[in-house]
Image (tube, helix red, strand yellow):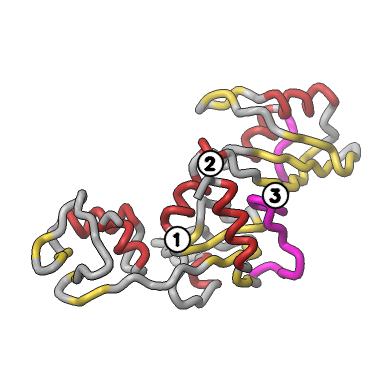
Amino acid sequence: MRLNAYLARAGVASRRRADDLIRAGRVRVNGDVGQLNTVVGRHDVVEVDGERVQRQPLSYVLLHKPAGVVTTASDPQGRPTVVELVPHEPRVVPVGRLDVDTTGALVLTNDGDLAHRLAHPRYGVPKVYEAHVVGSPSPDALARLRDGVELEDGMTAPALVRALVQGDRSSRLELTLHEGRKRQVRRMCESVGHPVRGLRRVRYAGLDLEGLEPGEWRELTAAEVGLLKAAVGL
């Protein structure tokens, strides 16, 4: 296991932050200063600032993220974070992000390999959203969302889109995406003339929110973890 992954598994820091610790010379492996390419085995002794760290057991959590909570481990503006909502030991961190005003299914884990693959677009993990939009999208607008729309960062991939409820002033759409750009659903809907009023992710990689109220979380079952790993080739 690479040193940054070991530190992430130990709950010391994210992989990116672990790289910073390694570059700063604050990490030692068997008494020697660790390097970015250092590989850690089961019997190696790893220390950060002179204190020994050890890998934690792998944990997997599903959270029903409420509005007003940021999808980070800490926030410089002092807003509540999803990590604070999940007082879990060992510490888990979010896979990907949901906007602060977006609610719904969010996986948190300390399994760095799984988290990396779930968030990587090459694995096409399905994400299902319900969007409350302004107006009544026409068949042409829905077709454009399905086929892909041009955003400032390029054309979106094909998506599954259907109207759940349509009214003159507002409608509710279901969109299934296999990529995860920043604020993607909001930008897609706005590009076809129907800005989003409210957004909820109802399913993530086949996991739904049954039995979970906003702010509640639960451990994933072994079967659910197995399905997540199978979906990304682990």
- The residues colored magenta run 193-215
Mark sitting on residue 182 = 2
Instruction: Name which of mark 1 and mark 3 comes first in the sequence.
Output: 1
Q: Which residue is mark 3?
A: 199
In screen coordinates, is 77 left or right of 150? left
Image quadrant where one finds the N terminus: bottom left
Q: Marks 3 and 2: in contact by CB < 8 Å?
A: no
**In terms of image quadrants, where is residue 41?**
bottom left
Kind of residue sitting beneath label 1: Asp
**In terms of image quadrants, where is residue 40?**
bottom left
Kind of residue sitting beneath label 3: Leu
Q: CA distance from mark 1 to mark 3?
A: 28 Å
Where's residue 209, x and y in %?
72, 62
Q: Which residue is mark 1?
A: 111
Where's residue 118, x and y in %?
52, 48
Q: What residue appears at the point 17 percent right and 64 percent down from the top-left corner?
A: 27
In screen coordinates, is 27 left or right of 67? left
